[in-house]
Image (spheres, rainbow, N blue to C red):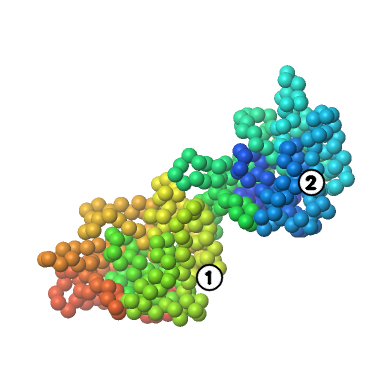
C-alpha cells in the first residue's frame, strides 16, 4: 500500500502548530475542552479568522444561548477580528432552536445541509455536550457515539476539520475521547500564588505532539502560546565546544581564565548583593563589536540605570547601542510566565545574532514561576538553545553568603555551567575587601589563586593575587587580543 502524507492546515498560531506536530489534520475531528473563561471561544474564532485570511471558508455553529451580536462585541477588541470576513468566509449559525424543537436527528440534518451549502474547510461546533439532555437516559452513551460517528464520517468524506468546543469536564475514559482524532484541553490554574493558564494536547492521532503543560495568555492578538522550552529542544540545536576565546572586558580576568572566556560557553557569576556581578556583565557587554554583537537581559535594573552605571565605571555604551552593536532588554516584574521569558530571550538572540549574552537575575526571577525541578530543566534547555545559536553566556546568580562559603550550591546552574566566577567579601584587618576566585574554566587550566579587586571610575580592576608579593603575579598566559572572538568559530 502506498504511503500517504497527512494533509494539515495551520491554525494561525505557529506555536500551537508546533505543539500539535505540524498543525491540525484535514478531515479530522478534535475536542477543545476547558472551563468557562479559559479562552475556548477566542481560540476557535482565531483559527477561523486565520483560515479566512487565506481565503478558506469556515462554518461556526453553536448550541449556546449567547447571541452572535454579543460574541462579536467581545471579539471586536481582538486584533484578528475582521467583520468584513463575515459571512462570506465565516458563516455563523445557531442550531439551538433546531435541537430544542426537533431533536438530535434534525440537528444532524441541519449540519449536513449547512456543510453542503457552505463547503467549509473548518467546522466549529460550540456547545457539544448540550445535546446530552436530549438523549434517552438508558441509551445515552450509544446515542452519543452515533452522533460523533456521524460527525466524523462527515468530516472525513468532505475533508473538513471539525472542532468540537465544550465546557464539560468529563472522564478521560468517556467515549468521545476515544472516537475523536485529537483532544486539546485549556486549564486555568488558580491554585498557586502565581495564576497560570496551560494548554495540554492529550491526543493527536498520527502526530508527534509536544507533551506537557504549555503556558498561554489571552491578549489583544488573541491566544499567545508558549511551548515548554524543554519539549522543543532538538539535537540539531546544540553545538560542540568551540576552541576560540572571547575577551571578558576585564584584562585581569582574561589572564586568570588562561586567555579569555571560552567561546560558546556558559559562565556563572556568583556572589552576594553588591559584589559586582552586574558590573562584570557590563564589561563583557562593552567589548562587543559589529561582528561580535551583545545583548543584556535585565530582570532587576532598567536599561537607563544600567547605562548610567556603565558610564560611572568608564564604559560608554551609548554609541554601541545607537550602532546596534549592544542591546538592552528589560523584562519587567509582573505577570510573567517562565516559558514566555524563555521565548523572548530566544527571539531577541535570534534576531540580533548576539554572540555575547548577559542574563542578569533569571534564576531569582524564575523561582516563583516554576518549582526547582522544572526551573532546572528549563534553564538547561534554554542554555542549550542559546549556546546552539553560537552565543557565549554570562549568568548572574545571587547567594546569601558574604564571605567565601564553605559549601556552594549552584542550584539550577549546576548541570550545565562551564565556568564559575565567585565574587565575595573578605576581612583584611578592619577593612572589607572584594575578592574574585575562579572555581572552574571549561577544558582549560586557569589561575586558582583568588584576587583582590576594586570597582573604580575606570572599571573593575583585578589587583594582585591574595597571597602574592607586592607587584603581582607573573603569568605566562597573555590576555586575548580584541577581535580574537572570531577565532576558532563554530562549524
Q: Specify the quadrant of the image occupied by residue 256.
A: bottom left
Q: Is residue 346 left or right of residue 62?
A: left
The residue depicted at 52 percent of the width and 55 percent of the height is 340
Residue 449 location, quadrant: bottom left
Residue 264 higher or lower than 291, as above or below:
above
Instruction: Left or right? Give the position of 480 relative to 167.
Output: left
Instruction: Return the residue at label 1.
Output: 352
Mark 2 = which residue?
92
Q: Which mark is residue 446?
A: none
Q: Residues within 10 Å of mark 2 (few under 14, many from 20)?
A: some
User: 67 above or below 256?
Assistant: above
Q: Which image quadrant: the N terminus? A: top right
| Residue 161 visible within the image | no
Image coordinates of residue 404 in percent, x first then y, are 22, 58
Q: Is 186 displayed left or right of 437 in the figure?
A: right
The crowd level at tag 1 (other Cα within 10 Å; few <14, some 14-19, many 20+) is some
- Of 286 and 203, nearer the camera is 286
Q: Is 454 drawn above or below residue 138 in the view shown?
A: below
Q: What residue is at 62 percent from the left and 52 percent from the top?
A: 223
Tell me the residue at 12%/66% (across/down): 430
Q: Is residue 471 at all visible to an observer of this figure?
A: yes
Q: CA distance from mark 1 to mark 2?
A: 44 Å
Residue 390 image point, x, y percent: 49, 67
Give how far across and how far down residue 228 sits, in percent: 53, 50
- Name the element at disc 1: helix
Mark 2 and mark 1 in contact (Cβ < 8 Å)?
Answer: no
Query: Where is residue 391 drawn, in percent x and y?
Result: 46, 67
For mark 2, give the secondary structure: strand
Q: Is residue 70 above or below residue 304?
A: above
Task: Give whichever of discs 1 and 2 has the lower sequence position.
Answer: 2
Amino acid at each position: 500500500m502506498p504511503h500517504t502524507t497527512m494533509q494539515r492546515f495551520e491554525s494561525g498560531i505557529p506555536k500551537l502548530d508546533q505543539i500539535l506536530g505540524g498543525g491540525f489534520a484535514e478531515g479530522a475531528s478534535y475536542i477543545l475542552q476547558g472551563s468557562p473563561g479559559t479562552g475556548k471561544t477566542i481560540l476557535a474564532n482565531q483559527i477561523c479568522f486565520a483560515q479566512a485570511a487565506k481565503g478558506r471558508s469556515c462554518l461556526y455553529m453553536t448550541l449556546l444561548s449567547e447571541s452572535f451580536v454579543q460574541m462579536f462585541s467581545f471579539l471586536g477588541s481582538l486584533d484578528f477580528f475582521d467583520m468584513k470576513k463575515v459571512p462570506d468566509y465565516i458563516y455563523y449559525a445557531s442550531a439551538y432552536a433546531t435541537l430544542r424543537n426537533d431533536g438530535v436527528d434534525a440537528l444532524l440534518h441541519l449540519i449536513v445541509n449547512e456543510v453542503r451549502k457552505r463547503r467549509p474547510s473548518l467546522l466549529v461546533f460550540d456547545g457539544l455536550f448540550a445535546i446530552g439532555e436530549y438523549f434517552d437516559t438508558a441509551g445515552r452513551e450509544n446515542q452519543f457515539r452515533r452522533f460523533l460517528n456521524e460527525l466524523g464520517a462527515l468530516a472525513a468524506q468532505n475533508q473538513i476539520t471539525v472542532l468540537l468546543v465544550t465546557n464539560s469536564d468529563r472522564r478521560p475514559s468517556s467515549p468521545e475521547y476515544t472516537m475523536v482524532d485529537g483532544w486539546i484541553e485549556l486549564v486555568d490554574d488558580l491554585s498557586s500564588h502565581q495564576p497560570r493558564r496551560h494548554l495540554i494536547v492529550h491526543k493527536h492521532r498520527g502526530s508527534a505532539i509536544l507533551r506537557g503543560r504549555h503556558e498561554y495568555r489571552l491578549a489583544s492578538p488573541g491566544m499567545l502560546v508558549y511551548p515548554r522550552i524543554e519539549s522543543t529542544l532538538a539535537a540539531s540545536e546544540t553545538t560542540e565546544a568551540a576552541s576560540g576565546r572571547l575577551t571578558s572586558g576585564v584584562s585581569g580576568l582574561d589572564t586568570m581564565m588562561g586567555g579569555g572566556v571560552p567561546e560558546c560557553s556558559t559562565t556563572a557569576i556568583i556572589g552576594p548583593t553588591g559584589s559586582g556581578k552586574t558590573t562584570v556583565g557590563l564589561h563583557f557587554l562593552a567589548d562587543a563589536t559589529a561582528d561580535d554583537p551583545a545583548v543584556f537581559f535585565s530582570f532587576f535594573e532598567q536599561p537607563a540605570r544600567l547605562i548610567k552605571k556603565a558610564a560611572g565605571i568608564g564604559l560608554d555604551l551609548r554609541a554601541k547601542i545607537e550602532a546596534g552593536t549592544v542591546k538592552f532588554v528589560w523584562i519587567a516584574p509582573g505577570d510573567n510566565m517562565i516559558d514566555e521569558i524563555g521565548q523572548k530571550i530566544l527571539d531577541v538572540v535570534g534576531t540580533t545574532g548576539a554572540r555575547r549574552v548577559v542574563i542578569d537575575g533569571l534564576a531569582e526571577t524564575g523561582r516563583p514561576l516554576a518549582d526547582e525541578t522544572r526551573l532546572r530543566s528549563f534553564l538547561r534547555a534554554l542554555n542549550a538553545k542559546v549556546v546552539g545559536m553560537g552565543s557565549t553566556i554570562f549568568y548572574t546568580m545571587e547567594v546569601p553568603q558574604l564571605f567565601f562559603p564553605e559549601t556552594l550550591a549552584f542550584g539550577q546552574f549546576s548541570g550545565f555551567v562551564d565556568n564559575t566566577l565567585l565574587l565575595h567579601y573578605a576581612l583584611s584587618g578592619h577593612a572589607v575587601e572584594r575578592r574574585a576566585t575562579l572555581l572552574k574554566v571549561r577544558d582549560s587550566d586557569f589561575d586558582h589563586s583568588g584576587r583582590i579587586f576594586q570597582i573604580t571610575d575606570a572599571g573593575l580592576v583585578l589587583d594582585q593575587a591574595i597571597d602574592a608579593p607586592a607587584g603581582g603575579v607573573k603569568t605566562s598566559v597573555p590576555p586575548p587580543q580584541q577581535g580574537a572572538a572570531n577565532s576558532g568559530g563554530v562549524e
